[in-house]
Structures are given as C-alpha cells and as structure tokens.
Amino acid sequence: MRTADLIELLARDVRATPPGVVNRRLLAAVLAGAAVTLAIVALGLRCQPLLLAAQQSWFWMKAAYTGLLTLAGMVMVRRLAVPGAKVGAAPVAAALVVLAMLALGAGQILFAAPPARLALWLGHTWKVCSPLILLLALPIYACLIAAIRKLAPTRLALTGAAAGFAAGALAATLYGLHCPEQAAPFVVTWYTMGIAAATGLGAIAGGRLLRW
Amino acid sequence: MIRPACRERVDLPVPQQDETEERLRPLMIRGLEGDSGAHRQLLGVLGRYLRGYFGRRIGSASAEVEDLVQETLLAVHLKRDTYDRSLPFTPWAYALARYKLIDHLRRRNRSIQVPLEDAGALFAADDAEEGAVRTDLDRLLQRLPERQRSLIEEVKLQGLSVEEAAQKRGVTAVSARVMLHRSLKWLNQALRDENG
C-alpha cells in the first residue's frame, strides 16, 4: 500500500475527539489501583483507630508528606504519558517536600534526649515499613502502567520511574491509615525508602512494560 | 551599578519552525474536531517531513524509511487524542517520530544513537519522493476477516465514505466506523510485529 493510500484511509477514520481523554484515563487508573490497595490496607493490615488518629498532628504530617509527593508524582506521570511535554517543576517540588521532611526529622532528633533518638528513627515497625509500602504500590503501579501504555509515552524508563514514584507515594499515604508510627525521622527514612524502591523498580519495569 | 550579563536565550524558535507550527497546529486541531480534510492535509505534510527525518537518520536509501513513515503516520493517527490542544504541536510530533525511530531500531537490535534534539530536527527538510515499502500493508490486510477487509477495500479503493460503505453493506454507520477504527488498530499492531 502506498503511503498516500494509507493517508486516505486514515482520513476516513476521523471523528471528533473530545479533549481531556488523557486526564480521565489516568484518573480512572489511579482510582482503581488505590481502591485495591485501600482494600488490602483495610482488610489485610487493619486500620488504626482513625477517629483518634485524626485528632493528632503527626497523622496529618504523614498524610501531607506522602499526599504532596503523590500529587507531584501524578503531575510527572501526566506530563510523561504523552509525547513532547516537559516534565516541568514537579521533580523539584517533590525534592523540596522531601527536604522539608528531612529538616523536620533532623529537628526532632536534635531536640530529643539522646537515649530517645534511636526510637524516633526506628519506631516499632522499621523492618516492615518500606517493604509493605513497596508491596502496596504494586496494584497502583499496574493500573497506571496499563493506562499509560494506551497513551503514548516516549521516554519509557523515566515514565516508569514517575509511575513507580506516584504509586509508591499513594501507597504510603494509604499505609498511613494503618501505620501508627508518629515520628518524622521514621517517616522520612522508611516511608521515603519504600517510595524510592518503587521508583527504581518502576523505572526498570517501565522500560519494558511501556513499549507500544 | 553593574548589570548582570543577559543570559543568552538558546531556545529561540527558528523562524522556519515557527511557520511550520503555525501551519500544522490548526490542521491538527481541526482534525481533532472531526475535519477529515484537515487531517488528510496534516498527514500528507507530516509524511514528507518524516521521510526526510528518517532518511537523514538511517540513510535515505534504506528500504526501512517508508515502513517507518507508515508506522509513524498510523501512530500519529491512533494516538492523536494524546495531543493537548493548548500546547505546541511540533514538539508532540517530533517526540512521537523519535520514539518510533528508537522503537524500530531497538526491535532490529541496532545501536544507532538517536539524539534528543529540538523539534526543528523533524521539520528541517521534507522529502516528497515516496519510497518502496518492505512490509506491504495490503498483504497484512489479507489476514483480516473478510468483513473488515472488504470494508477497507471499499473505502480505500473505491473511495467511498464510511457512511456510503455502511449503507451498501446494510450496517449502521456507527458500526462501520468502529470496524474501520479497529482494523486500523489491528494493522498498527500487525505492522509492528512484522517489523520486529
């Protein structure tokens, strides 16, 4: 078939396309993934007493940290899922959020009595925190990848990393419904490590999974 | 007072590229609004630029150039809903073309570096001389079920509109359109598998 004939054929397949398809598909994917992860948190891990926790500032400190990272991650995913868009300032914003949390964590360590410092850092659950976040990120990551594949990513590893980052941060947010740890040093270490692991694995897997 | 030296602007758009943008973006937007004439015109212009770009990258004598042009035009068509109407069009088209080139080379295990350039790289020079293809789409179409194949034949060879073809076969225009769109998606996948 000549290229001119192909163009003729493609021109016959033109229909008005409403804008906003990309946003809708990504939103649907992230909601579907979050629903699965939320179910695992609520039914498998059990939530902490939420009415009590919601009155504490540490609960909202954690939610704000991972929530802001989720937002930055989804902005990156949105940009990278289509050709030609720049990643923009979202990675810088994410880095600033992590830096702010590091500062808060360092402050808590500095102002704590020396014998109490290790407990602020390790809490009671440091061994399971990062792996659980990574695990909980999987359903969200899978849904995001399935949606992005149907769009048109052109930088696959980077897009995979962004999807892993967003999935990790959202998984960490939902994990906060279960996790009773209260200290900023704990959060900035083990939560961030879980998100970082999701980002790295997301990049590796994305390079292959996202080909279209 | 010492004024800091003005930072040199390196991203000044080349005038020629600006013109291309101004010419192509309205065509793309009208195509998205359902204007098939604008879409046809856009694909025609893009096809010539793509031929020039791929030719410069893998050698214009290569028989793969025309395959790549067709593959990329199919992708531009099938992925056009990922274009954001509020953004410039040429970077979108360039990123898509570059991805198709990388994907093509990767599937052939060839290690040609494809530099990430300004969108102007795609629109530097066009080439209207259509080359021969290695993978003939007509041959791939033979694998489609009879109903889909004959719809494409009617639309392509006899130049019927989808509505006319639908009427002729006694199906609704909507179902004929869906069938055509599915066939094109299938063709895109088959072409990619064939070349991979």
Image (cartoon, rainbow, N blue to C red):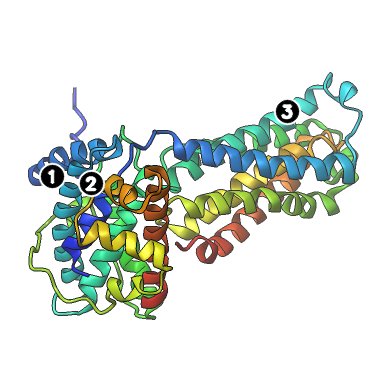
Q: Which dot, 3 or 1, sits closer to the camera?
A: 1
Q: Quadrant of the image for the N terminus of chain B?
A: top left
x and y, in percent, of residue A94 in the image: 55, 39
For mark 1, name the chain.
B
> How many residues crowd around disc 3 within 10 Å: few (fewer than 14), some, or many (20 or more)?
some
Viewer-nearest of labels 2 and 3?
Answer: 2
SS label for mark 1: helix
Q: Tell which of A157 and A212 is nearer to you.
A: A212
Query: In the rendered structure, are the residues bearing label 3 and label 1 in contact, judged by CB atoms less than 8 Å apart?
Result: no
Say which quadrant the C terminus of chain B sits in: bottom left
Q: Position of residue A175 (x, y in %)?
A: 78, 41
- Residue position marked by numbered label 3 in the rendering: A61
Seen in the image, is A83 located left or right of residue A2? right
Q: Which mark is residue B90?
A: 2
User: Are the residues tagged 2 and 1 within 8 Å (C-beta)?
Assistant: yes
Q: Amino acid at mark 2?
A: Thr
Same subunit under labels 3 and 1? no
Residue situated in front as seen by the camera: B43 or A54? B43
The secondary element bearing badge 2 is classed as helix
Q: Nearer the viewer, residue A123 or B179?
A: B179
The correct choice, above or below, for B116 with respect to A87 in the image is below
**Which residue is denoted by mark 1 in the rendering?**
B20
The secondary element bearing badge 3 is classed as: helix
The three-letter amino acid code for the residue at tag 3 is: Met
Residue B55 shows in this picture: yes
Kindly identify the amino acid type of the residue bearing the numbered disc 1.
Thr
* Picture coordinates of residue A38, whole percent (x, y): 77, 40
The answer to whether dots 2 and 3 both sit on one chain is: no
